[in-house]
Amino acid sequence: MKINRPRGTRDFLPDDTRKRRYIETKLRSTARNWGYNEIKTPTFEHLELFTVKSGEGILGVIYNFTDKGDREIALRPELTAPVLRMYVNELQRAPKPVKLYYFDNCFRYERPQKGRFREFWQFGAEVIGSPRPEAEAEVIALASHMLEDAGADGELHVGHLGIIRTLFTGLDTATQGQIMRLVDKKDDKGLEDYLEEIDADIGMREKLFELIGLTGSDAVQEAKRLLGDIEELETFQALLDLLNIHGLDYTVNFGIARGLDYYTGMVFEIYSSGLGAQNQVCGGGSYRLAHLFGGKDIESTGFALGFDRVMEVCTAQPPEESRVVVVCFDETRKEGMQIAKTLREHMIVDVDVMGRSFGAQLKFANNVGARWAVIIGEDEVAKNKVALKDMESGEQEILDSDELVKRLTALNY
RNA sequence: GCCCGGGUGGGGUAGGGGUUAUCCUAUAGGACUGUGGAUCCUUCGACUCGGGUUCGAUUCCCGACCCGGGCCCCA
């Protein structure tokens, strides 16, 4: 009986894994150079952590189970909540800002599609403790730079939930949420019908439609005309100025809603083409979560990058890596292993484990793409030398083993 | 969860109610026991699963599972 992978999971073959590792390493080093520290949280958490944060609605997509001690456990569907939980548990007294990054797998029970899996990887970062636009701008800039590292193009959209919410005074949370959902979907007809249904104020309706249509460089000016000189617009303008300083291209979009309603201020999304319906590769914003997990309320900003989606669109390729194959036989295995051991301190070395003939070992060297074959046969051992064969030119020379190591390491392998 | 379109060796494919199920590629070995890439030979290996229709199903029908596209939601 053949056993297959569970639905929505993937096996990563050597080439896939190498490329993923390569991109991951690039992202890590960028996060690191921006002063963020890596953390790890558990693969599973108390289910409550996620329902408190996102509401019962998230149960539909969560992998949860009752453990042998009757605890309700969930495989993490995302990492912001675990990171903030960790912050509350261990880092509240750490010097601010607390700058963290993570790269881990997450699980959601959803219908798999292009760019959507049941096990997927998120690369994210959070700045905890700064309510200032400088922190928001830094987070956005970091996300953009990471995509650039990966060779992925992205279109950055920035909005601010606080601004649109000033129109909602007097509306309850559920109604606000429904409006934001329709705004996010860009379902103008549905939005109009819904506003009619709840008998929303005519002036508010007009302002809302005008606001979500605003875009371009004077969007903020236009918004001021609509809403007056409110504080949210001032800080939003400050953020945009900082994005300019960071040298980022962006589109102002007051219609970005983000799925989860714990976002309080700035929100941003980055889209990439070539991903079909799942075109969002990154999402983030400013939020308040710590108080939900029993901590002191604190302003945070963060983002999560859909690593699998980045992999779909990224053009960066891992560098070619060359190998050396050491060819030896039963009689010369000892000498062969010694050379291999020395060379392995510097480069990738294969030695035959198939009991193959001389010719077959060279064929193997060819197959694995080895640039060099080091031949250690009885003739060489008798002369206390080794033969170095260039697999491209076919040329071969006799060296002693010190020269061999020097030669190969000098070639940067 | 909903709506489409698909599943033939490891990968890519041809075919089609009764076949020895096609070809390419990859694997392992050999021709070629101290010199690779070419060529040739051999080997390994498949009709996703379960029902139904039928004398007979890999082929037709239904369902499940899985994959792809879209909706929803989101990364």
Image (cartoon, coloured by chain):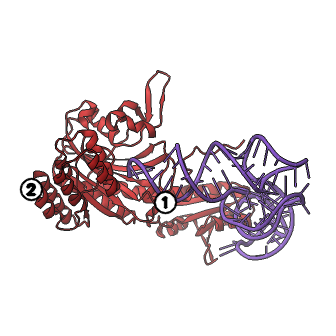
- Position of the N terminus of chain A, as image quadrant, is top right
Q: Can residue A283 be seen at all in this image of the molecule? A: no
Q: Is residue A123 left or right of residue B58?
A: left
Q: What colour do you see for chain B?
A: purple
Q: Can residue A28 be seen at all in this image of the molecule? A: yes
Residue drawn at x 19%, y 68% is A217
Q: Where in the figure is residue A178, as x and y percent of width and height? A: 31, 45
Residue drawn at x 65%, y 68% is A366
| Location of mark 2 (residue) | A228
Q: Which amino acid does label 1 sit on?
A: Lys
| Location of mark 1 (residue) | A19
**The chain coloured red in the image:** A
- Rendered image quadrant of residue B15: bottom right
> Given the image, what chain letter belongs to the residue carrying mark 2?
A
Near-viewer residue (A347 or A379)? A347
Residue drawn at x 38%, y 59% is A26
Q: Is residue A217 left or right of residue B52?
A: left
Q: Which amino acid does label 2 sit on?
A: Gly
Near-viewer residue (B15 or A299)? B15
Q: What element carries label 1?
A: helix
Residue drawn at x 33%, y 59% is A270
Vertical comparison of A48 with B20: above or below:
above
Check if mark 2 and mark 1 are on a common chain.
Answer: yes
- Rendered image quadrant of residue A4: top right
Crowdedness near tag 1: few (<14), some (14–19) or many (≥20) residues, C-alpha within 10 Å:
some
